Amino acid sequence: MALIVQKYGGTSVGTPERIKHVAQRVARYVAQGHKLVVVVSAMSGETNRLIALAKEVAANPAPRELDVMVSTGEQVSIALVSMALMQLGLKARSYTGAQVRILTDSAYTKARILNIDQGNIRADLDAGFVVVVAGFQGIDEGGNITTLGRGGSDTTGVALAAALGADECQIYTDVDGVYTTDPRIVPDARRLKTITFEEMLEMASLGSKVLQIRSVEFAGKYRVRLRVLSSFEEDTEGTLITFEDDANMEKAVISGIACNRDEAKITLLGVPDRPGIAYQILGPIGDANIDVDMIVQNVSHDGLTDFSFTVHRNDYLKAMEILKAVDAHVKSRGMVGDDKIAKVSVVGVGMRSHAGIASTAFRALAEEGINIQMISTSEIKISIVIDEKYTELAVRVLHKVFGLEQPV
Ligand code: ADP
Ligand code: ASP
Ligand code: MG
């Protein structure tokens, strides 16, 4: 008998039929003697619909109110899933994040989980209930509803699995595992049987939305056994996220290609090249709780340098506003922004021991006439920023040049 946390995404609970299907799967696990905690997302499209509705009323809705609103999507799902389970004769009980007491900080729309109260869940599990928890939401110290950022139900699932010491956290979605790249962009992408946490962390942070990055961080930190599976197919093994040391594998040099169209680039031209300038520019951005991703500072000419960085597109206008104020002191030669960029990344732990990966990638892009605007590398990834319109093409050529497609 095991304690299993199963998380079902939006498409997996997208219709009454899909919800009944989820209930049947849960019932099979219960019949095998397992204890189940089920985390669900809002029905597909619902979160987008709610955000669009808010924006019809206010161009820039107050984040606290936005969270009150978007959290309702998941509340509908937990009730429906519980009802479906009861229809099958199971004992089930639903909980919102606040009812569990998933305590978060107060960063509305991107809150972080601080603590999970397990009391209710444990008591219900012991009494034979399936516990159904709303993903994506929590409550702060002041009793305000918070949400965890898009895709946040994955994090609820893994955090619950960590808190409860579950035997496995299963993420059920609309693909049957983690692929070498988004199978919607490259149809002959290959499913990976295993991927290391380190690689999954890179893939997720670089735009592979199959898992929210914080869920992978949690799983790595608390050593949660994490698996991605299809809710549309039965008995598939999916993809297991492994620790490098326990994975006795013939690793490919490159494990995948990720892409991200959520960023925007900002450049300050000709800023004085002196100590403290990066802090002067990025300090106020950080103070406004805006995450900065790539940063490039160019060679100095005549004591001046160009300074570029990327932020999430949602933060683009706010960042530009802040920089206008900063520029009054920094006195650059001008500021330019571009929110039509994409970041495409090549990921693989094998890169550590292989030279020439970057040049292979750059040659492949050059042959397609794709101009590279920014480059950043780490031990296990190479990221490049390009014009958004070349995203799919870049993903396809990189996937091919590293031989990641399915064998024929
Ligand atoms: P859910 O609603 O179940 O949380 P998501 O849409 O958040 O589902 O995540 C699943 C989607 O992630 C897939 O449909 C796929 O298009 C996309 N995806 C992006 N990169 C990958 C990848 N490397 N492997 C698998 N899926 C990926
Ligand atoms: N419903 C939320 C979203 O669409 C959370 C999730 O699906 O994980 O982002
Ligand atoms: Mg998701």
Image (tube, helix red, strand yellow):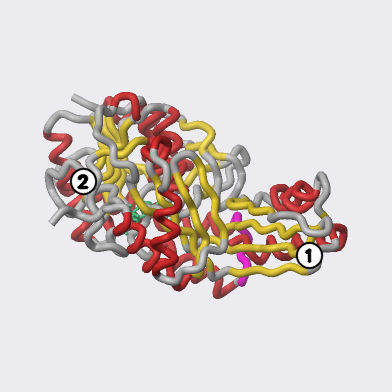
Report the side of 405 relative to 201 (left or right). left
**Residue at the location (40% across, 70% down)?**
368
State whether residue 35 is above or below residue 181. above
**Residue at the location (22% across, 38% down)?**
91
Of the numbered discs 2 and 1, the one sitting upstream in the chain is 2
The residue at which mark 1 appears reads as 324
**Residue at the location (50% across, 57% down)?**
384
Q: Residues in magenta?
A: 59-64
State whether residue 154 is above or below residue 401. above
Q: Assign a secondary structure to mark 2.
A: helix
The one nearer the camera, 190 or 301, is 301
Quadrant, the C terminus? bottom left
**210 is within the stretch colored magenta:** no
Q: Position of residue 258 (x, y in %)?
A: 40, 54
Q: Are marks 2 and 1 in contact (CB under 8 Å)?
A: no
Q: Assign a secondary structure to mark 1.
A: helix
The residue at which mark 2 appears reads as 85
Report whether residue 326 is seen: no
User: Residue 56 has which mark?
Assistant: none
Circle 2: residue type: Leu
Q: Position of residue 166 (x, y in %)?
A: 31, 28
Q: Position of residue 235 (x, y in %)?
A: 12, 43
Q: Quadrant of ligand 2?
A: bottom left
Circle 1: residue type: Lys
Residue 39 sits in quarter: top left
